[in-house]
Image (cartoon, grey):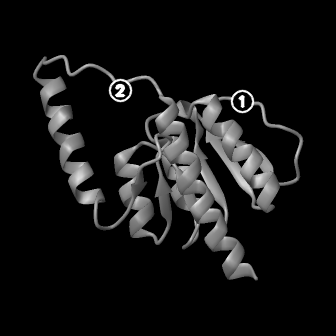
């Protein structure tokens, strides 16, 4: 398994959790962004800088993932595409996207986009909370444990 992070909008606190997990479990992790991102010195952690542009980082992730890889993103269309390719998806708020729930999430996203396009202010997402961080870390631990069991 490889962990791919849609890193442009990923909060630093989530990146820090991921860095510790990659080191602890010795799993490769790549931050994908259209800007240079600092990474801790590690043979397991690297960053991939892509050119600027709409969905360029998303496409780079889709071009590189393999079945079973984990992608960290809150981008619903990217999550749907990853699931179609056999990957796992976890949002930085701790929501595990699956083939069972991604269609509903796409519908909500499209509805909200329609509202915004018609001039309705839908507000932005709330600040990342302690419970979001805990949910993220809990799901990540479960995924890492299942990888460790599979490799044993």
Q: Secondary structure at mark 1?
A: loop
Give the residue displayed 54% in from the left and 73% down from the top.
Answer: 67
Residue 52 in view: no
Whether 129 is drawn above or below 29: the answer is above
Count residues near mark 2 (Cα–Cα under 10 Å), then give few for <14, some for 14-19, many for 20+. Answer: few
Give how far apart the Cα atoms at labels 2 and 1 are: 25 Å
Residue 83 in view: yes
Image quadrant occupied by the C terminus: bottom right
Whether 39 is drawn above or below 136: the answer is above
Residue at mark 1: 36
Left or right of 138, for residue 40: right
Give the x, y percent position of residue 81: 39, 60
Give the x, y percent position of residue 26: 81, 61
Residue at mark 2: 125
Give the residue displayed 88% in from the left and 53% down from the top.
Answer: 43
Left or right of 64, for residue 30: right
Give the x, y percent position of residue 106: 25, 50
Left or right of 136, for residue 104: left
Give the residue displayed 59% in from the left and 48% down from the top.
Answer: 137
Image quadrant occupied by the N terminus: bottom right
Count residues near mark 1 (Cα–Cα under 10 Å), then give few for <14, some for 14-19, many for 20+. Answer: few
Left or right of 104, for residue 145: right
Residue 45's disc number = none
Q: Secondary structure at mark 2?
A: loop
Residue 49 sits in quarter:
top right
Q: Nearer the viewer, mark 2 or mark 1?
A: 2
Between 58 and 5, the one nearer to me in the picture: 5
């Amino acid at each position: 398994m490889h962990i791919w992070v849609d890193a442009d909008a990923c909060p630093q606190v989530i990146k820090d959790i991921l860095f510790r997990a990659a080191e602890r479990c010795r799993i490769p992790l790549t931050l994908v962004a259209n800007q240079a991102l600092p990474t801790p010195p590690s043979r397991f952690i690297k960053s991939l800088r892509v050119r600027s542009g709409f969905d360029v980082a998303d496409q780079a992730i889709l071009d590189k993932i393999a079945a079973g890889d984990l992608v960290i993103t809150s981008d619903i269309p990217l999550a749907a595409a990853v699931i179609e390719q056999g990957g796992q998806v976890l949002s930085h708020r701790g929501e595990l996207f699956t083939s069972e729930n991604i269609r509903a999430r796409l519908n909500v996203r499209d509805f909200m986009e329609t509202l915004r396009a018609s001039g309705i202010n839908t507000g932005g997402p709330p600040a990342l909370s302690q419970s979001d961080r805990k949910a993220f870390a809990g799901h990540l631990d479960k995924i890492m444990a299942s990888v460790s069991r599979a490799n044993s």
